[in-house]
Image (cartoon, rainbow, N blue to C red):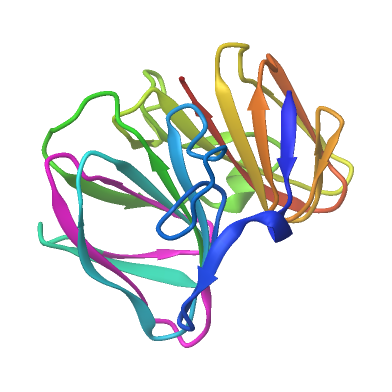
Amino acid sequence: MIERRPFNGLGGANHGWLDAKHHFSFASYHDAQRMGWGALRVWNDDTIAANTGFPPHPHSDMEIITYVREGAITHQDNLGNRGRTEAGDVQVMSAGTGIQHAEYNLEPGTTRIFQIWIIPDQRGGAPTWGAKPFPKGDRAGRFVVLASGAQGDEDALPIRADARVLGLTLAAGETAQYELGEDRFGYLVPAKGVAEVNGVRVEERDGAAIRNERTLTVTALEDVELVLVDTAA
């Protein structure tokens, strides 16, 4: 089963400095049919104006993954961490027992991100933050694990959940496969371009909610850059 969720049908809010689209219920947007997908709780498509951003605010008991689509995001938190994550790269914050952080676009132009929240396997634990570059050339034609709670994914940023976040780039006409497994939940979004997933066309910034599909076959209908989340129930 693959349910395409068109970008123009997503919930959201435009705050001026922030234009946010929500694949799942978030803040003032509520849809009882879209409260999450497996352990995936939030997928926000955020467009952040230059020299603005999210001021300091708290989180706890959530794995928060930021995939930068365009521009860069600068992170700072009450643990003393500070870092700038550029387009194509990823940062992960394990909120654990509690963390206060801010995310700013300090660039001269617009920044666009996917903000992904995954429910951790257990509550608590010391909060952490980390970031890592993932050159797009390294994931040309194949899925690369960006963040993971699975053993064997040592090159990925760690998260405290039975989940993986993966990236893939394909040139038009190319195909890649991923073994999801029938007991897993998948959610896929093209950051750029158009793809076909097991015969279902998915446009740029659409969501594809995937269930009971053991193998995913992704074909690029045009040059495509996409993100896939693979989680337990």
The answer to whether residue 96 is magenta is yes
Q: Quadrant of residue 214?
A: top right
Give the residue drawn at x 87%, y 30%: 199
Give the residue drawn at x 13%, y 33%: 125
- Left or right, 79 with reference to 132: left
Which residue is nearer to you in this view: 44 or 104?
A: 44
In percent of width and height, residue 58 lies at 19, 57
- Left or right, 166 with reference to 63: right
Q: How many marks?
A: 0
In percent of width and height, residue 50 lies at 45, 85
Q: Is residue 96 above or below residue 224?
A: above
In percent of width and height, residue 37 lies at 52, 32
Give the extent of the magenta segment: 83-111
The answer to whether residue 11 is magenta is no
- Left or right, 137 with reference to 148: right
Give the residue drawn at x 52%, y 40%: 32
Which residue is nearer to you in this view: 143 or 28?
A: 28
Q: Is residue 62 above or below residue 216?
A: below
Image quadrant containing the N terminus: top right
Give the residue drawn at x 29%, y 24%: 121
Q: Is residue 128 above or below residue 185?
A: below
In percent of width and height, residue 129 lies at 24, 49
Q: Is residue 20 visible?
A: no
